[in-house]
Structures are given as structure tokens and as C-alpha cells.
Image (tube, grey):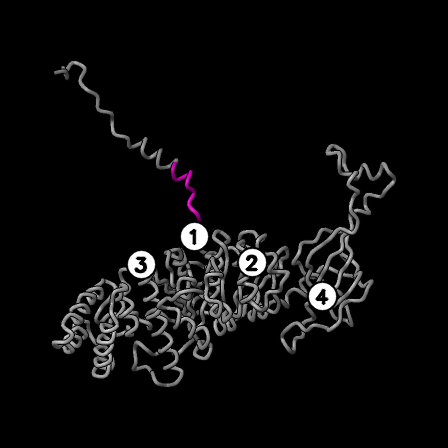
Amino acid sequence: MIGIVNHSDEEGFTFISSERLPSGMFACYHESDRKILCRVKHAEPINEYPQEFLMDMELSADDVSAFYGLDPQDFKYYSYSASVVGYFDSSMGEFVHPRTNPASGMKIQRAGEDVLKDISKIKAGEPGSAFIGNVLGENTGIALSVRDIVSQHVSVIASTGAGKSYTVGVLVEELLKPQNMAPVLIFDPHGEYATLAEISNTAEFVTPSYRPFVRTVKPKDIKIRISDLLVGDFISIMDDGTMSDKMKTLFRSAYHNLRNDKKKQFTRNELKLQIESLRDSNNESTIEGINWRFGKLHASIFDDFQTIPLADYFKVGQLTIMDVSGIEEGFQQLIASVMLRRLFDAREGTENNRYNETHIDKFLPYPVFVVIEEAHRFAPQSGEAKSKSILKTILSEGRKFGIGVCMVSQRPSKLDADSLSQCMTQITMRIINPTDQQQIAQSIESASRELISELPSLAKGQAIVSGVAINTPTLVKIRKRLTSDTKGRSKDAPALWAAQKKYEEKHKAPEVRADEEMDVGV
């Protein structure tokens, strides 16, 4: 027992305890032969020392109290506010609120494993489970439902240095384990997930019949096929702010004429010839202006035939890391847009039987999972990004076609609010910026108000996990990764400076001195 109920109201209840209890911890009480789970919110001391007892820094307040005949223990009791979560109904698979608060005088206990185990919707290690850590301060493991993550999306939000990429690594590890064997793609703008390649040779992932495969795609190997671009993509690439409406109209005509003729694939030269076919005496300068801007399509990232090979990137039991570091942000958005657009078309076409085994590059007969790092770049709250429209489409409709998305960001206030609200499971780590906290509170319905207030005080590796993949919002200590974590760590600048200085001293060229016998004077 840790306390006794004092008062109840519509907000919850309060209980008295002499123990120091952390906010967010779970407790429980017995009612009708059931254990009712509840969450501790915050504490206030019942009695405070008179200010006079605290004026002398060298004297203990307890000693002063005893001198005046007061019991120091009277100042050690706290009133805790708490909220009721409910009892677990196994037939419904969720916690049910009893619709009453505990009566005054009822005993409050620490929640044990027998109660806390029901926080997870699925047992760790079972098919479709993702073990991500333990209830903070407890030994009870927390496993997320992979089915719910993939079908209804997930967000990982944290300030820099709070363990965001580390946590994504843990989630990806779970998806690649034998109980899941998921096809996963990470869109990696900073090249910080390379160490996940260790998955292939780590014992925890390998069985006699299964070994996951990790494929890393370098920037030089990423190509966008010209015919995969929409007319809006072309104009966004070519327009530097000086492209006239007449140029855009003529280009659209050339594009649509080519689409109507070819319907499937075309090359840059074929598009250029189509533009030239529109030339007449009235638009000479306009055509020349289009041709001059057309040169931007000769960048190395564009190709007449090569494209993003979906069938190679999305395979059961395979992690594909698309390393787009070093590619300018506009092209990163374009790559994401083309990849997601083709992925959506492939899954929608496969589900609706438009594509079958004969459509090698469009047939995807199973759900897939995509991690979007720096998501605020690809679906910004204000302004436009080439990838924003298709990303919002997948987040709202992807459930029907089996495309799961993990949105990862350190600035939720810069991330499109509609996109964030579509992520029905949330892993939220330390957030200090008040604007970011407000965005989370508005976008995440399942995160209770008292847990949102915990965001600034979370330590590295601690998270609030909430949403459909778990039965109630919970403070979690993220487990240790099975693969290395080196890319996402901050640089130790002083150590690197010292190492560089040591290297320079070791390889210092011998000082060249003038020959003392040589007459250097004039």
C-alpha cells in the first residue's frame, strides 16, 4: 500500500501518502474483485514548515520542529492527484473506465506486473509484436501492435539529442525480427541509419529459415525516370521564378500531347521534340525560353530509363535505406514524391487487381512500411513541398492499401498538422519548445494533458507512448538497441580537436633552418 484515498471529483481523485512518487507512475486499487489501474499526476505537501523554521541554513528544519515540540513526520505527507484508467476487459481487449472514482478511505497500491502487463495489446515476442522498452521505473515490458502501426501510421517526435533516431532504430529492429519480417524502407536525409546494416549478421534476427537483408542505396544510385514526373514536377524544376504563364501553358501542351501519344514512358529527347513541334512565328522566344530551362533536366539524378525499383526496394524481410544525404532539399522532396507516388499506385493497383505478376515494377502483393526522417521537410505546416500532397494522400488513404508510414521530426510545429494527426500511434520524447508542445497537444488526441506536461523533463531515451498500438498512454524507457548507434550521436568536438592536434604533432614536417655558414645577406 502506498496511500489512502482522500477526495474524489470529476477530475479524478486525491490520495494521501508519505512516499515520494513520480508523476506519471501507475497505481491501482481493488473494487468488486477487480484491480483498477490509475495514474499519478502531481503532488502537493499537506503541511509546510513555517518560514521561520527555514531561515537558518545551518539548522535542520526537522531539528527546529522537534525543539518546538512538533513531530517532523507531520511535514512528510503529500496529497497526490490521480486519474482512473480503468480495469482491463479481456473480451473487449482494452481498459474500461468503471464510471466511478474510488471512495474515501480506499487503499491505493503500486501497480504490479499482473496489472501493467495489460498495457500492451500483444505479448513481446509473439507474431506482430514490437518490444520497445519497459514501463518507466518498472520491469514490465511494453510491446506495440505492429498491425496497428502499419495500418494506422506512427509518429516519433523529439528534440535534438533526445534519442529520436535511436528509437526509430529500435522500432525498425523489431519490424525486421523473425516474428514480423517486414518490408521496410527508410528515407534518410542525413545518412544516419547505416549501422542498421548489422541486422543481417546479428543473432537475434537470424533463424535457420530466416535472415533479414539490408540494402543501402547511395545517392549516386538514385535515379528518377523522366516519364515518372508529372507536369507540375517539371515546372517546379524548370521555373526559377521567371517562367512566364505562356511558357507554362506551352509546356503543359507538349507534355499532355506526349502523354496522349505514348501514355507510358518517354525520354527527354522525345519531350524536347514535342516542345519544338509547337514552335511557330508567334512563340519563337517562348520556345527558346523553355528550351533554355529544359537544361535543368539534364542533372545526373534524372534518367530516361532508370527509376526507383519498387520490387527490389520492398521485399519481405528486407530493410532498404535510401541515403539521400548530399542531395539538395528540393531534389530530396522530388525523390520522395516520385517514390511514394509509385508506391501508392503499385499497392492500390495490386489490391484492385489492375496489376499482377506480369507487372514486374508495379506488383506489390503485401503491406509495406516507410520511415520518413525530417518529416517536416516533406510535409511542412506552411509553404509547399513537392512531396506534401502524396504524403498526405498516403496518410489518409494508405490504410486501405497497406502502406504504413512513420513520421519522424524534431520540430512538430513545422510539420503539417493534418499529417501529424493521421499518425494514430505516437512515440513522443523530450520536447522543450512550447510551440512544439502545443502542436503535439492539439494533434495527438490520446496523449493526456498531464503526460504532455512531462515532455520537457523526460531524460534521453524516455518517451510517452500512446495511441492505437497500446492500451493506454505510458511513460516508457526505450530498450537498448541490438545494433550500433554511432551516426546519430553528437560530435565530441574537444576530443576531435585534441586528436587532430596530436596527429599534426606526430606528422609535423621538420623545420627548415637556414645554413648558418651561408651568407644570406646582400
x, y percent for residue 196: 41, 58
The circle drawn on residue 488 is 1
- Choose mark 4 or mark 2, whichever is in front: 4
Residue holding disc 4: 11
Q: Position of residue 510 (x, y in %)?
A: 25, 26
**Vertical side of 434 occupied by 249: above or below:** below
Q: Main secondary structure of the magenta part?
A: loop
Between 484 and 336, the one lying in front of the other is 336
Left or right: where 406 falls relative to 78:
left
Q: Point out residue 404 in the picture as x, y percentages from the top left corner.
A: 45, 71
Alpha-carbon span between mark 2 and mark 1 = 18 Å
Label for residue 328? 3
Q: Residues within 10 Å of mark 3 (few under 14, many from 20)?
A: few
- Tell me the kind of residue under disc 4: Glu
4 or 2: tag closer to the N-terminus: 4
Neighbour class for label 4 at 10 Å: few (<14), some, many (≥20)?
few
Spatial CA span between label 3 and label 4: 51 Å
Q: Which of marks 1 and 3 is in front?
A: 3
Task: Name, please, the residue furthest toward the right.
Answer: 69
